[in-house]
Amino acid sequence: MGMKADIRLIDDNGLRIDGRLPNQLRPIRMEVGVVKRADGSAYVEWGGNKIMAAVYGPREAYPKHVQDPNRAIVRARYNMASFSVDERKRPGPDRRSIELSKVISEALTSVIFVEKFPRTAIDVYIEVLQADAGTRVAGITAASLALADAGIPMRDLIVGCAAGKVDGVVVLDLNKEEDNYGEADVPMAILPRTGEIALLQMDGDMTYEELTNAMEMAMEAAREIYRMEIEALKGRYGGDVNE
Ligand code: ADP
């Protein structure tokens, strides 16, 4: 949520700068099983985002002192490639990616049956190859697909989706300009079947009523993204997916 430049984000017809309606998602494409050596993997294109997720595990956790005798530990690592943004990003972890890795790990832990795999680690690598706002939610979506591809038992597939506010209007799935110049961005991770929320963050300001609208908009979209996840998994496993 940067300084408002003199650009309008919503036009006279109520459309956004990329022509979308307030409650419209960017185009999304998903594919599972994209790399050979991981136990599970997925690739997601979401608007201008291109994200790869790969999963290893559950396997015995090392170093040993990190093992939990009661459950698997889930270690997500969110990483942005140097070439993923306009200005070359300095490689390696920074404050932001460390925070995102932590909150994504927690969200994924809440859906995986971790107690089935004591002393193990499940490693989830999220590689952002191209970024255009909303990478954490697209990354969570890719991670969920990669976990399913790895055959890791989960309570349900998890869906990432953001909503926010630009030019005073509540909108779904902010793009880069909207993220930069809008008033609020609320990334969420959702379990669409139960309506549970596994992650909710907020950058910027909105009223309680606007936040409620944004959450409803994201919940609705999450059901659509969930169907895309099922389709992507069916594409690989020929219909052998529990719905
Ligand atoms: P998210 O990608 O989950 O929306 P942010 O709100 O922190 O996370 O970032 C919004 C967008 O800003 C990113 O998707 C990316 O396009 C851009 N961005 C983030 N970090 C950097 C960086 N270090 N250098 C350049 N652009 C960045």
Image: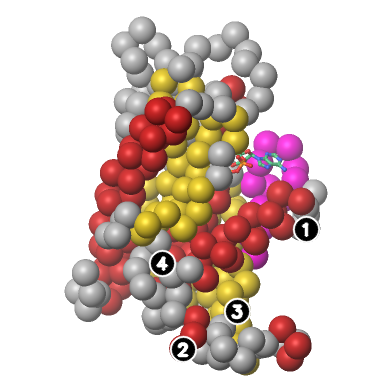
* Residue 220 shows in this picture: yes
Q: Name the residue carrying label 4.
A: 145
In the displayed structure image, the side of residue 145 where residue 201 appears, left or right: right
Magenta residues, start to end? 77-89
In the displayed structure image, the side of residue 219 where residue 163 appears, left or right: right
* Residue 33 shows in this picture: no
Which of the two labelled residues, at mark 2 and mark 4, occupies the earlier sequence position? Answer: 2
> Residue 153, percent across and down?
39, 80
Q: Foreground residue, 215 or 36?
A: 215
Q: Is residue 172 magenta?
A: no
Q: CA distance from mark 2 to mark 4?
A: 20 Å
Q: Name the residue carrying label 3.
A: 73
Residue 201: quadrant of the picture:
top right
Which of the two labelled residues, at mark 3 and mark 2, occupies the earlier sequence position? Answer: 3
Q: Amino acid at mark 4?
A: Leu
Q: CA distance from mark 3 to mark 2?
A: 11 Å
> Residue 162, percent across and down?
46, 42
Q: Amino acid at mark 2?
A: Lys
Local crowd size for mark 2, using a 10 Å CA cut-off: few (<14), some (14–19), many (≥20): few
Q: CA distance from mark 3 to mark 4?
A: 18 Å
Q: Nearer the viewer, mark 3 or mark 4?
A: 3
Q: Foreground residue, 150 or 188?
A: 188
Q: CA distance from mark 4 to mark 1?
A: 25 Å
Q: Name the residue carrying label 1.
A: 92
Q: Which mark is residue 116?
A: 2
> Residue 212, percent across and down?
39, 35
Q: CA distance from mark 2 to mark 1?
A: 33 Å
Where the C terminus falls, by quadrant?
A: bottom left
**SS at badge 1:** loop
Local crowd size for mark 3, using a 10 Å CA cut-off: few (<14), some (14–19), many (≥20): many
Q: Amino acid at mark 1?
A: Gly
Where the N terminus falls, by quadrant?
A: top right
